[in-house]
Amino acid sequence: MEKTFYFIFILFFIGFVSAGDFSISPPQVNFEGETKQNICREFFITTPEKSILIGEDRWGEKEETRRKFSAHTFSSEDLNLEVNYPELIELNGEIKLNICILGKEEGNYHGLLLYKLGGAPTGIGIWLNVSLTKGNSLIKISGKVIEGVNENSKFNLALGGSLILVLVFFLLVTKLKYKPQKKTEFSNQ
Amino acid sequence: MNKKLLGIFIFGFVLLAAGFVSAEDANDTMVVKANVLKSVVSISVPEEVIFQDIAKGYISERVDLSIKNTGTVDISVTPELAGDYTEDIFEYISFQKVLTDLFTKIRYFDFEIEKPTTVGGEKSQNIYMYLDLEEYAGEINSDMMDHQTEVVFWAVPL
């Protein structure tokens, strides 16, 4: 009787994929930067047991903002985006992964990073929000040079001032130490 | 006797008073702790659906599916036929969210599941699945035994 009970108990749970622990985090990842800049972010995946995960990315048309799965049918190549992440993972437990995006054109992009559990009808995904501005290298370099000079001037001023003070101190000490003493006359009588 | 009684009373009073922490000496902070978990997207789906024998012009029996949100965020779920399926039979898979809804073909269907009421719990959403070949446009000239494909239920945050 007990054996029958345990058998039925086990059968009951076999019907469902134990994907309760198949999860991905965070729900969305934001990428902000400039064109031709490789921007990387972290995400986490957890599986309940040794599993094969198959990754893919899908994108909405440029400037898409809706969180609608069916509106994301483009590939990253369609949008001139280079997207790098692990596409095939063998995993047992939790792992921290990186996804990197490099865009050639400025603009706002909205995408999905998806992972499907191998041999199971379960797929999970997170949203990718990408905002790229056109990089202006000339101004950046010039700004850095100007900024650098200002910082160096302050440092030099402080250093110079300190050195002068130290010098004055030593001069004073030296003067006091080697102050000529008054001759005392001893009268010989 | 009275003195004894008074002595016991005073002693008891002192004991009682000593039992209370002096407000001036007490630490007036309370430490609060909690495990704050990261938000996760997670779903649980039945492994297999088997329809009974069917032919062109017929609707299958109804299959009740319970899809579970096992994460910590509200999700949208979209079923999708496997990318390598080249036939068209299972494109006629249809769903209802409630029994009074019209059938919605798989390529247009999605639904939402709220996050569980407690962390670590699950929230179920029942949907109804059919294979509706009533208006199947193709011709089925020979038996297709054990005709099968994979349907992936994609869960993404709302």
Image (cartoon, helix red, strand yellow):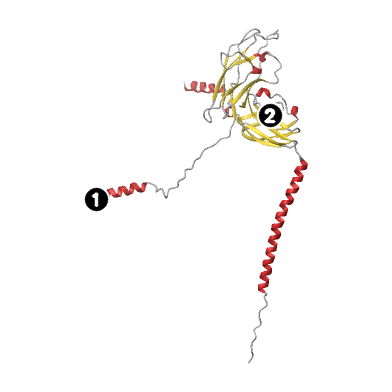
**Relative to residue A38, is residue B67 depicted above or below?**
above
Q: Is mark 2 on a helix, strand or loop?
A: strand
Q: In this view, does A20 lie to the left or right of A178?
A: left
Label 2 packing within 10 angstroms: few (<14), some (14-19), many (20+): many
Dot 2 and dot 1 within a common chain: no
The quadrant of the image that shows the C terminus of chain B is top right
Label 1 packing within 10 angstroms: few (<14), some (14-19), many (20+): few
The answer to which quarter of the image holds residue B92 is: top right
Residue under numbered circle 2: A110
Q: What element carries label 1?
A: helix
The x, y position of residue B20, in whole percent, is 37, 46
Amino acid found under the numbered disc labelled 2: His
Q: CA gap, disc 2 to disc 1?
A: 86 Å
Residue farthest to the left, as pictured:
B1
Is residue A21 or residue B10 the one in the foreground? B10
Q: In this view, does A6 lie to the left or right of B53?
A: left
Residue under numbered circle 1: B4
The x, y position of residue A150, in whole percent, is 72, 51
Residue farthest to the bottom, as pictured:
A189
Numbered-mark total: 2
Q: Residue at x 56, y 22 (%)?
A: A14
Residue farthest to the right, as pictured:
A138
Q: Are marks 2 and 1 in contact (CB under 8 Å)?
A: no
The answer to which quarter of the image holds residue B130 is: top right
Q: Tell me which chain the residue with mark 2 is part of.
A: A
Amino acid found under the numbered disc labelled 1: Lys
Q: Tell me which chain the residue with mark 1 is part of.
A: B
The x, y position of residue A182, in whole percent, is 66, 80
Q: Which residue is drawn at 59% across and 28% down?
A: B42
